Image (cartoon, helix red, strand yellow):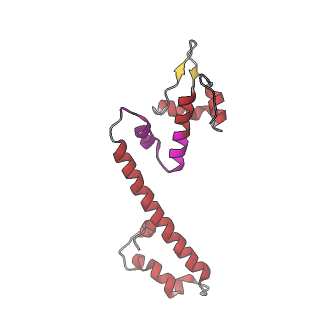
Amino acid sequence: MKSSPGVRWTVGELAERFELEPHVLRHWEDKGLLLPARDSAGRRVYVEDDAYRVAVILASKASGMSLDQIRVLVDSSADGRRDALRAHLDELDRRQAELERSRHMTQHALECRAHDIATCPGFRAHVSDIVDGSVRGIAFLGGHR
């Protein structure tokens, strides 16, 4: 993001810069994620540091973090930043295992000659942990294989 020192944005201008609605920035302020300065009339004034914080919030949300997790990440006075990041890494690992298993099963089904994949011995092996009860419900996507 290129901007010159001393650049200032209104809530609408900064929201537009990130293709957000202004109420999103106000909501993030209510959640403690943004702390914009105020002008003499009480209007929010955003500076370059605020723009970087918005970019960090958006990138963190895109990685699957909740606003509560992000607040811990951007609040220098909050304890637990490392714990929140470790928990997020654990969640990412779980989701990656889900995706890998799902991709493997889908690839097998795509290449399978059986018209009904439920009759395919290879595909059955992918879901045998559900059938034998070692995994319940749709939790089979949790990477137990």
Q: Position of residue 66 (x, y in %)?
A: 46, 45
Of residues 41 and 77, the one drawn nearer to the viewer in this rendering: 77
Q: Position of residue 67 (x, y in %)?
A: 47, 41
Q: Note whether 12 is above or below 116 in the view shown.
A: above
Q: Position of residue 75 (x, y in %)?
A: 41, 34
Q: Note whether 127 is above or below 9 in the view shown.
A: below
Quadrant in the picture for the N terminus: top right
User: Which quadrant of the figure has residue 51?
Assistant: top right
Secondary structure of the magenta portion, mostly? helix
Q: Position of residue 93 (x, y in %)?
A: 43, 60
Tell me what residue is drawn at x 37 percent, y 51 percent: 86
Among all residues in the image, which is located at the extreme top?
40
Q: Note whether 39 is above or below 30 in the view shown.
A: above
Q: Is residue 116 left or right of residue 30?
A: right
- Across the whole image, how many numbered discs are drawn on residues? 0
Q: Note whether 123 is above or below 21 in the view shown.
A: below
Tell me what residue is drawn at x 45 percent, y 82 percent: 125
Q: Is residue 7 left or right of residue 65?
A: right
Region of the chain picked out in magenta, as a range: 56-77
Of residues 135 and 106, the one drawn nearer to the viewer in this rendering: 106
In the rendered structure, does residue 16 fall within the stretch colored magenta?
A: no
User: Which quadrant of the figure has residue 12?
Assistant: top right
Tell me what residue is drawn at x 41 percent, y 74 percent: 145
